[in-house]
Amino acid sequence: MESIIELIEAFYETRVLSYFNTLLAYPIKIVILIIDILIVSYLIYSVIRMLRGTRAMQLLKGIALLLIINALSEFLSLNILHYILNSIMTYGVLLVIVVFQPELRKALEQVGNTDIKKILDFEEEEEPSCIEEVVKAAEEMSKKSIGALIVFERDMSLGDYVHNGVAMGSKVSKELLINIFIPDTPLHDGAVIIKDNKIQAASCILPLTDKESIDRIFGTRHRAAIGVTENTDAVVVVVSEETGAISLAIGGKIIRDITDEQLRKELAKRVVKSKKPINYLKRNNIKKST
């Protein structure tokens, strides 16, 4: 017991006390420390938010527990346990890389696809958005209870999903969208992916969410919408075939049973991008609701 107390005292004097003395001697380091803590806290928060409700969260908890036990074993001089844990963690890194290879590949792909103009804010205003056509199509399909799954690609590439569908490259129109999703037609089963105001592909297969807390009333379309927004920054419009309700999926979450005006507002806010703010309602001669 005395040896443990001595270890704690030695650690306090050589590490903690000396560190605080350094901070007091150089106040600028306090500012740097605060910035460092804020950045790390934000990164941890982002990871936890992204993995919340998925099976990967359990793996993250296991890794955190191993790190804590490993630190304690080193501090308490439990050499055998420390050696075993170090060995597990060394090979564990390789295991995590193998298990999460698709996610890592997509992340690296996104970094490689980043447009320098977006970083430097040199991006020019885009052409008028196709949002109104999508809203009108969703409204019509909602009335007729035609199931639909419409994905807007944003910054992260959806190339993998486009390639597993039927390439189109067509201008977005209400009539075309409705015809695609009419039951028993060749392209109705799957998702439509829109990029740069064009339908890039139809009948695309999307990944289903792994979340166990999803309401049982959600069918395959809703689970696919949540799944693709967990892995990318896409925005997805879903029309339920059973109820005709319109939903919007963003960031792994879904907004249920929204009106066409709410859909128009959300899409205008999240999909339309330009260097200067675009008054989408004015551009399309749409009156604001009072």
Image: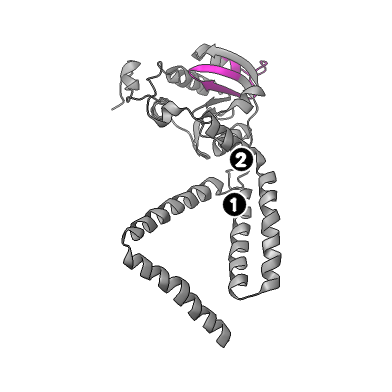
Residue 204 percent location from the top left of the image: 63, 24
Q: Nearer the viewer, mark 2 or mark 1?
A: 2
Residue type for callout 1: Met
Name, please, the residue furthest toward the left: 290
Residue 224 percent location from the top left of the image: 60, 34
Residue type for callout 2: Leu
Task: Indicate the secondary structure of the residue bearing disc 1.
Answer: helix
Q: Image quarter for residue 167?
A: top right
Name which residue lies at 44% across and 20% down. Answer: 131
Q: Which residues are magenta?
A: 179-201
Residue 133 percent location from the top left of the image: 46, 16
Tell which of 115 and 145 is nearer to you: 115
Q: Image quarter for residue 103?
A: top right
Residue carrying label 1: 57
Residue carrying label 2: 104
Tell which of 145 and 26 is nearer to you: 26
Name which residue lies at 53% across and 83% down. Answer: 5
- CA gap between label 2 and label 1 equals 16 Å
104 over 89 or under it: above or below? above
